[in-house]
Amino acid sequence: MSFSIHTASVPVFKQMLGALSAVLQKAETYAAERKFEPSALLQARLYPDMFPLVRQVQIASDFAKSVSARLAGIEPPAYDDTEQSFAELQARIAKVLQFIDSLPAADIDAGATRDIVLQAGTPREKKFVGQAYLLHYGLPHFYFHVTTAYDILRHNGLAVGKKDFIGTY
């Protein structure tokens, strides 16, 4: 059986974004039940030099859409990073899930051998072949930001565990 770039990417992005969405819903409920401003969680950080929760979710969703798009051979759509509420983050995740679902699996699979260049022509230019881009760049960055979002909420008292992080598979 051959390795499928689509199978290694889109279902993983969908599973983890679905789990992140569920954790964000729990966080919104948590804030409401304890009668504190949701922004206390949305702007929470693990450390002062790290991005807050809202930015972690934005970046995780950006990796899901951008990696999928580049593997499919198209330019990633640009989304404004203006979300400031749980509802807006949920809408962003839903938009990303809809986008990656729209990409033909065959186009993504064809990306396994496609050359992918990030920040073309800049001093920090990175060149990959599709499979390496997914496995060594895209997925690690995606998981980092999903994990950090989860950790911010857990650190702030949200009762979630490994099942919440992994989601439905």
Image: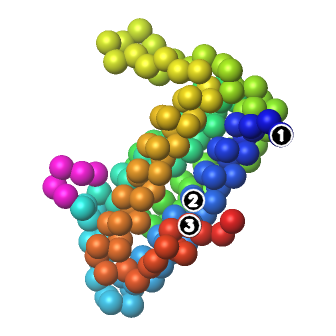
Residue at (29% x, 73% y) in the render:
155
3 or 1: tag closer to the N-terminus:
1
- Of residue 100 and residue 123, the one placed in the foreground of this image is 123
Residue range corresponding to the magenta coloring: 47-51
3 or 2: tag closer to the N-terminus:
2
The amino acid beneath tag 1 is Met
- Residue at mark 1: 1
**Residue 77, x across and y down, in percent:** 58, 34
The amino acid beneath tag 2 is Met
Depth-wise, is mark 3 or mark 2 nearer the camera? 3
Label number found at residue 16: 2
Crowdedness near tag 1: few (<14), some (14–19) or many (≥20) residues, C-alpha within 10 Å: few
**Residue 157, x across and y down, in percent:** 31, 81
122 magenta-colored: no
Q: Is residue 38 above or below residue 69?
A: below
**Residue 105, x across and y down, in percent:** 79, 38
